Image (tube, rainbow, N blue to C red):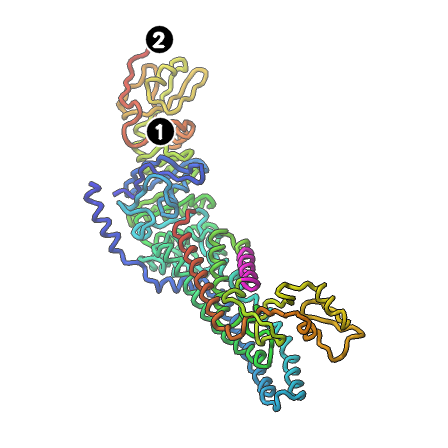
C-alpha cells in the first residue's frame, strides 16, 4: 500500500505555483523525510496530503486509494502542523478529551501514560507549557489517535536539541511499536539523516529526488579525478553536480549500481545523504525520481587524451 | 494490483461510521463556555432589568388606566406624571439595548472562527476525524439556536415592558424604529443576523479584531438602512389629510400641499402673514404678537386651501411588520451561515 500517491499534482496561489508536476508513490512503513529549502513547497505538499488544501492540478490519494481529506483519510492520518497549534487556554486533560471527542479512535491510556512519563501535568494549560512540552503534547494527541500515517510539518524547528531528541524518540517508538508510517518535513536534513529511510527532496515547487535512502546512496558516487578530464565525462556520465578545483574535480554522479565502471585514473567514493541532497539542491535541473534514470545506459567508452 | 485493491478500500471508506454529533457538543461547550457564560449573564441581566422595571411600569400604568373620568385634567395630569417618570429611563434602555445584537455579532460571531484562523488551530481541528464541515456546523448551529431563542424571549419581554407607554398614549407606537427592532421577533432576527455576519466576517478576514470591527460596521449599516428606509416600505404607507394625526402610528412624513402641489415654507409663511404667525417647519408654528388667540395656524391653512398630507404606518401593522422583518432577517442569517460553512468546506489554507 502506498501511504501517499500523487500524479501530476500541482497547487497554485494566484499565478505562482507553490508545487507543480509532483508525481510520487511513497510506500508504507517508512520514515519519510521531506526536505527542501524554505518556500520550496514542503508545507503545500503536506497540506494537500492531509486535506487542508485542494489541488489545483493533478490528483493525490492517501492510505491506499482514499481521497485526501475524505473521512477515511482523516481517520487514518494524524497531522501536527507547523508551530504545534493547540488551544492555549485548554489544559492537557481538556486537549486529550477534545481530541478523543473529535475522533473515532483515541487511546486515552496511552496518552495519559505518555504525558505522565514526560512529566507534563494534566492540569497544565497548553499556553503555559514550554515549547518542548507543547510539541510533545501535540505529538501525543496525534499518536493516541492510532493513525496509520503520521504527518509532521517542521516539528523540530522551534525545539532545543534535547527536546528534538525526545521528540524523535517518541516518533521512532511509535514506528517500531505500532508500524506507523511517518512523513515529516524539515529544512535541516542533519536532524533526519540518522532516522529517515526515505527521502523526498523538493525545491522551487518541484520534486527533485524521491526514493529509499539506501537505494539513493547505492546509486550515487562521488568521482574524484583531474580537472582537465572532467569535461569529457560530464557528457558521458550522469553528473548531478560538478565541483572543479584547480587540479582536482569532484563529480557527483548517478549510477546504475556499484558495478558501474570508473574512468581510469579516477577514484569513486560512496556519498552521504547530506552531500547528495546538497548536490541536488545546487542543481535545480537535476532529478532522481523513480523510473528510468536519465541516460542510465551510458557506458564509459574510453578516455581520449 | 490497484484495480483489485481499490474496491476494498472504498468499501472500507464508505462503511466508516462517522464520529457522533453529540461528541462535538462537548467540544463546542468546552471551547465556548466562557462565551456562553457571557451571553447568559448579559441576557439574564437584561431580562431581569426588563422584568423588574416592567412590573413597576405596569403597576404605575394601572393607576393611569383606573383614573376616571379619563378625559379630566386630573387624569391627564396622572398620565403626564406617568410619562415624566418612565419615559426617560425607557428611552435610555432603548438606546442601550440597540447595542445588544451588535455586541453579540462582535463578541460571539466574529471571534468564533476568526480565532481558529488567527491562532492556526483550524489546522488542528480540520484534520481530526470529525471532519471540518461537520465541525463548523457543530460550532455555529448550537450557538445560533441559543442566541435566537434567548433573544426571542428578550424581544417579547421588551414588548411587554413597553406596552404601558403605548396604552398611555405614546403617539409613536410600537413601530417607531428604536422600539420596533427590540420588540417581538425582530430582536431575534437582528441578533441572529449579527452573529451570522460576524461568523462570515471572521472566516473571510481571519483575524479577530478586524473581523469584530467589520461586523459592527456591516451590521450597523444594515440596521440603519432598514430603520430609515427599508422598513417603511414593507407595506405601502397610508396617507391622511386629517389634522388629527393618527396615533399610535409611525409617521413617516408630513407635507403641506396647495392645489395638489407641495407648498414651500416660504409660501406657507406668506399664507400665514395675515395672522402674523411663522412656520418654523411644516409642523411647528410660532404665533406672533398680533396673532389672534383663537386662531389655530393649522386650521387657518386648511381653511385657505392648504392640505396637510401625513404619510404613516398604523400601529395595527406591528405584527405584520414583525413577521416580515423576522423572516427576511432569518433568511439572510441562514444564507450567511450557509456561506460560512461553504467557505470552510472549500477553503484552502
Q: Residue at x 29, y 51 (%)?
A: A72
Name the residue carrying label 1.
Answer: A287
**Front in this rendered view, residue B347 or B321:** B321
Q: Residues within 10 Å of mark 1 (few under 14, many from 20)?
A: some
Residue B291, x across and y down, in percent: 77, 75
Q: Secondary structure at mark 2?
A: loop
Q: Residue at x 42, y 33 (%)?
A: A204
Residue B218 in magenta stretch: yes
- Quadrant of the image for the N terminus of chain B? top left
Q: Which residues are magenta?
A: B212-229
> How many discs mark residues in the rendered view?
2
**Front in this rendered view, residue B145 or A216:** B145
**Front in this rendered view, residue B293 or A290:** B293
State the predominant SS element of the stretch in magenta: helix
**Front in this rendered view, residue A30 or A194:** A30
The image's mark for residue A305 is 2
In screen coordinates, is A291 left or right of B54? left
Residue B71, x across and y down, in percent: 63, 87
Q: Residues within 10 Å of mark 2 (few under 14, many from 20)?
A: few
Subunit under mark 2? A
The image's mark for residue A57 is none
Residue B84, x across and y down, in percent: 66, 79
Amino acid at each position: 500500500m502506498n501511504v501517499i500517491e500523487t500524479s501530476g499534482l500541482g497547487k497554485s496561489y494566484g499565478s505562482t505555483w507553490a508545487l507543480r508536476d509532483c508525481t510520487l508513490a511513497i510506500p508504507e512503513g517508512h520514515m519519510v523525510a521531506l526536505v527542501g529549502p524554505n518556500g520550496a513547497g514542503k508545507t503545500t505538499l503536506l497540506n494537500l496530503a492531509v486535506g487542508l488544501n485542494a489541488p489545483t492540478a493533478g490528483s493525490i490519494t492517501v492510505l491506499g486509494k482514499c481521497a485526501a481529506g475524505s473521512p477515511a483519510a482523516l481517520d487514518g492520518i494524524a497531522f501536527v502542523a507547523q508551530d504545534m497549534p493547540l488551544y492555549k487556554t485548554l489544559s492537557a486533560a481538556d486537549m486529550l478529551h477534545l481530541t478523543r471527542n473529535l475522533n473515532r479512535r483515541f487511546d486515552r491510556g496511552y496518552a495519559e501514560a505518555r504525558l505522565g512519563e514526560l512529566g507534563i501535568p494534566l492540569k497544565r494549560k497548553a499556553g503555559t507549557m514550554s515549547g518542548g512540552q507543547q510539541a510533545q503534547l501535540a505529538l501525543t494527541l496525534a499518536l493516541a489517535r492510532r493513525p496509520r500515517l503520521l504527518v509532521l510539518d517542521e516539528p523540530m524547528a522551534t525545539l532545543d536539541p534535547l527536546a528534538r531528541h525526545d521528540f524523535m524518540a517518541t516518533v521512532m517508538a511509535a514506528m517500531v511499536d505500532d508500524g506507523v508510517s511517518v512523513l515529516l518535513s524539515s529544512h535541516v536534513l542533519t536532524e533526519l539523516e540518522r532516522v529517515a529511510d526515505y527521502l523526498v527532496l523538493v525545491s522551487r515547487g518541484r520534486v527533485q529526488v524521491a526514493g529509499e535512502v539506501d537505494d539513493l546512496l547505492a546509486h550515487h558516487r562521488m568521482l574524484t579525478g583531474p580537472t582537465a578530464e572532467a569535461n569529457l565525462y560530464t557528457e558521458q556520465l550522469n553528473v548531478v553536480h560538478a565541483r572543479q578545483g584547480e587540479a582536482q574535480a569532484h563529480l557527483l554522479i548517478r549510477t546504475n549500481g556499484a558495478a558501474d565502471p570508473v574512468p581510469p585514473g579516477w577514484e569513486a567514493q560512496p556519498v552521504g545523504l547530506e552531500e547528495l541532497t546538497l548536490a541536488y539542491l545546487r542543481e535545480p535541473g537535476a532529478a532522481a525520481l523513480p523510473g528510468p534514470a536519465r541516460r542510465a545506459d551510458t557506458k564509459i567508452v574510453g578516455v581520449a587524451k | 494490483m490497484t484495480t483489485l485493491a481499490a474496491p476494498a478500500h472504498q468499501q472500507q471508506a464508505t462503511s466508516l461510521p462517522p464520529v457522533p454529533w453529540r461528541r462535538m457538543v462537548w467540544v463546542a461547550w468546552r471551547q465556548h463556555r466562557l462565551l456562553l457564560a457571557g451571553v447568559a449573564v448579559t441576557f439574564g441581566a437584561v431580562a431581569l432589568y426588563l422584568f423588574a422595571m416592567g412590573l413597576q411600569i405596569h403597576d404605575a400604568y394601572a393607576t393611569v388606566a383606573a383614573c376616571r373620568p379619563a378625559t379630566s385634567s386630573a387624569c391627564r395630569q396622572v398620565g403626564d406624571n406617568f410619562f415624566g417618570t418612565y419615559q426617560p429611563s425607557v428611552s435610555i434602555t432603548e438606546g442601550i439595548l440597540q447595542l445588544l445584537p451588535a455586541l453579540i455579532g462582535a463578541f460571539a460571531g466574529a471571534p468564533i472562527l476568526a480565532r481558529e484562523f488567527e491562532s492556526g488551530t483550524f489546522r488542528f481541528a480540520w484534520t481530526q476525524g470529525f471532519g471540518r464541515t461537520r465541525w463548523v456546523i457543530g460550532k455555529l448551529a448550537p450557538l445560533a439556536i441559543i442566541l435566537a431563542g434567548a433573544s426571542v424571549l428578550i424581544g417579547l419581554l421588551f414588548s411587554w415592558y413597553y406596552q404601558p407607554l403605548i396604552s398611555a398614549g405614546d403617539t409613536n407606537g410600537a413601530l417607531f424604529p428604536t422600539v420596533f427592532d427590540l420588540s417581538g421577533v425582530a430582536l431575534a432576527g437582528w441578533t441572529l443576523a449579527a452573529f451570522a455576519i460576524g461568523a462570515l466576517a471572521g472566516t473571510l478576514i481571519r483575524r479577530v479584531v478586524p473581523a469584530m470591527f467589520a461586523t459592527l460596521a456591516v451590521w450597523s449599516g444594515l440596521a440603519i438602512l432598514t430603520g430609515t428606509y427599508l422598513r417603511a416600505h414593507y407595506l405601502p404607507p397610508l396617507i391622511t389629510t386629517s389634522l388629527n394625526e393618527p396615533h399610535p402610528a409611525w409617521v413617516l412624513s408630513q407635507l403641506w400641499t396647495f392645489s395638489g402641489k407641495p407648498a414651500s415654507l416660504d409660501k406657507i409663511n406668506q399664507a400665514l402673514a395675515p395672522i402674523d404667525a411663522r412656520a418654523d417647519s411644516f409642523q411647528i408654528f410660532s404665533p406672533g404678537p398680533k396673532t389672534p388667540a383663537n386662531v389655530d395656524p393649522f386650521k387657518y391653512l386648511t381653511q385657505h386651501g392648504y392640505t396637510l398630507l401625513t404619510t404613516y404606518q398604523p400601529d395595527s401593522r406591528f405584527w405584520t411588520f414583525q413577521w416580515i422583518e423576522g423572516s427576511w432577517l432569518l433568511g439572510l442569517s441562514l444564507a450567511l451561515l450557509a456561506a460560512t460553512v461553504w467557505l470552510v468546506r472549500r477553503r484552502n489554507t
